[in-house]
Amino acid sequence: MADILELHEFFSEGSSQERSHVLLHLTEPGTPEERAKGYFFALCEINNGQIGQIEHLQQMIDDLESGYYETDDLPNKNAFELTLEYINRRGHHILENKEAVAHCLVGVLRGHDIFFSYHGNPHAFLFYKSKDQIESMNVIGNAQDEQQNQLFSSVLQGQLNSGDYFYASSPHVIDYFTPDRIIKILQTRNTRQSAEHIQRVLGDLNSDLSFGGIFLHFPTTTDVPKTGKTPLRLDNTGSEASLDKLADQEKITEQIMSPPLLGGLKGKLATIRKERETERLKQLEKAQEERQKKLTSEKGRIETNIRPRAGKKESILNTILIGVGKTIVWVFTKIIKFIKLFVFGIGRGFLVLFVLATNYGNQRQEVFCRHRLWWYEKKEQFAAIPLFSKILLFLTLFLAIVFIASITIYKTRAAIQAERQAYENSISAIQDKKNAADGSLVYNDTNRALTLLQEAKNILEKLPTNNEERESKQKELSQSLEESFFKIRKLTVVTPEVIVDLTKTKQDVKATGLSHVDGFIFAHGTDDSNLYKIALDGFTVETKDHPGFSKIIAGAAPKENDMLVFLADDNKIAAYSMDSGAVIPKDIAFSRNNVKLSAMFLYNRKLYVIDTTNNKIGKHNPTQGGYDKGVDWLKEELDVKDAISLAVDGDMFVLKSNGEIYKLNAGAKQEFSISGLDPALDKPTVLRTNSAMNNIYILEPTNKRVVVLEKTGKLIAQYTANEWQNPTGMIIDEAKKTAYVLDNNKIYKFELK
């Protein structure tokens, strides 16, 4: 009685097909000829492979399978070896991409004889029973195939005894299922259950890698080996023959590979190689010719693209090509005919219209007569049609109209149903994302909550509102999202106190910015020739002029609070002396031409300025009359052409008009990003911080708010007021938890929480 073969596979597809793609192929013979050649199996994994390479790899497996079953054995070489030699000649399609890595194991099982070859680093083990326990043997070894210039450089062969397991897997399976773990699985499960267990565990990993493997097993009634010997043997001399050692017989390359499995047979294999080397090419060509003759005479064989062959497939192909050619000619002829009729019809139509409009050659009546004659002939032709034919004609037209109407109604209903389903799905998605965002807020994960709410808002903006019900639903969801956004935004609506109204001091005041030093706030503007000094202890206002120094765009004080330096839009600077109370122009030089300064800051008495024209940040040391020509402080290329404000606390923070903030240290950019802020900054104007402040404060007129950030970029709070219209200036007294905001020549004061 013939042995029964158990053949089971396991497969788990990963989430990243680009990183890992596994092909698993098992062929059970169907015809008597194929059964004589046994079972074909292939297991391949390609990492970082392109679609073309994966397709070539799949085609290689198909070609290897069909070539094996269609190729006859030779006296000194079997069909599997012959087919591998042919496949190796085409392996460059798979190996041409050096970034992709392919691992393949292909083989056949003929009775108890097994032949296989490999490329790369797949895994293959033999599990056999010895003294009532299962042992394992690595039949490939730990070394990766060194013949990388071709796919399969050697063939291993041996015998699989009853009760033994032949196991092969893709490379990454061993990370989760070692041979010892597989032994434990085989001890408690049958072969099918073992494969299913491995597949289930690998699937539960949810890995981006793909996994695959096979089990080959000849079961016995007791599953106990007949002898105590290791079940694998190289020779084939008796019933105890096994796969104790695999003969690694090199069939293609010019070097004989000699892994540890060869043992004492190395000399014998070298002799075999020398004897066969001289006959190899001649035998291969002869085998191909004989196979071509046989394939030409056989019927019903499976055609592949391994080799060009004559026979039924070529005749079918020729027939198809001829049919396609005739179809193309027929279609082309009909198109030409249609174009000709269309052009001539249009031409005749224009000619008739021309004659009717101009009565050219007095042919208008003739045209009318021809038209009436044509209409009369058509009516006569219709009247001559039998009644039954007329009924059939009208019935056909009626059915055609009904058919077209049915299709139109069906498609319309399907479109309406699809649109309704998409709408419901969008509503569900918005609600799910909002619920998930609320859950994230419970765990203080504001970044994830903000991302989810923004995604929900994007979906909401695309919702159709083509009826009152949907419009009402859209408003309801929008309000619900705004409630969640309000929690994330940490927005506080304050009621600020107006401490100074500059218009009461001077009617034509045009203050746009604020600066401060030692208990005083200075209001200034680019279109105002005066400075307005406000004492914080009584909010009294003193007006000071600064002749020859107009259009102040920024001011900064050193930590000593003994003066206040102003920057004008013509790149001039001046200093307000706390002792004299005068605004005194100061000298400053530049090492480059066409300088345009947009912002400045004093730190350790050194003046830092942003030159937007030259895309530079300069550092100027103080001199007796002002500041020197300075040096370039930036150590890398950064875009500061739209920078509008800066502050230094040891690190430098540069605010750009698009809302982006650079964090710099020693002239180099540091990692910094704003998190948890919604909406994003839109055309901010002022950034305030220093070494004595714990936070960063930003004024944004667009949304009429003051944004408070940690120096890591995380949102702390936001403040807004209904009284603000277009806030442009800001001063922060963090120690007293007080903020001052300039809006329309009014200075507001509110408390920071």
Image (spheres, helix red, strand yellow):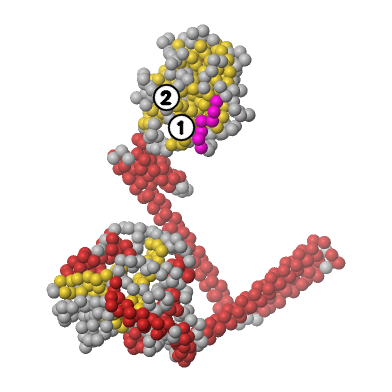
Which residue is situated farthest in the top direction here? 580
The percent position of residue 747, horizontal first and vertical second, equals 47, 18
Which residue is situated farthest in the bottom direction here? 297
Quarter of the N terminus within the rendering: bottom left
Q: Which residue is tagged 1?
A: 666
Position of residue 639 relative to residue 288, above or below, is above
Position of residue 350 relative to residue 229, above or below, is above
The image's mark for residue 690 is: 2
Pointers 1 and 2 in contact (C-beta within 8 Å): no
Residue type at mark 2? Asn
Can residue 513 be spotted in the picture? no
Position of residue 57 relative to residue 612, above or below, is below
Quick one: label 2, few (<14), some, or many (20+) residues within 10 Å? some
Q: Residue shown at 25%/73% (left/top)?
A: 126
Q: Is residue 302 magenta?
A: no
Position of residue 10 relative to residue 1, above or below, is above
Q: Residue shown at 21%/65% (left/top)?
A: 180
Q: Nearer the viewer, residue 721 or 403?
A: 721
Where disc 1 sits, the SS reads loop
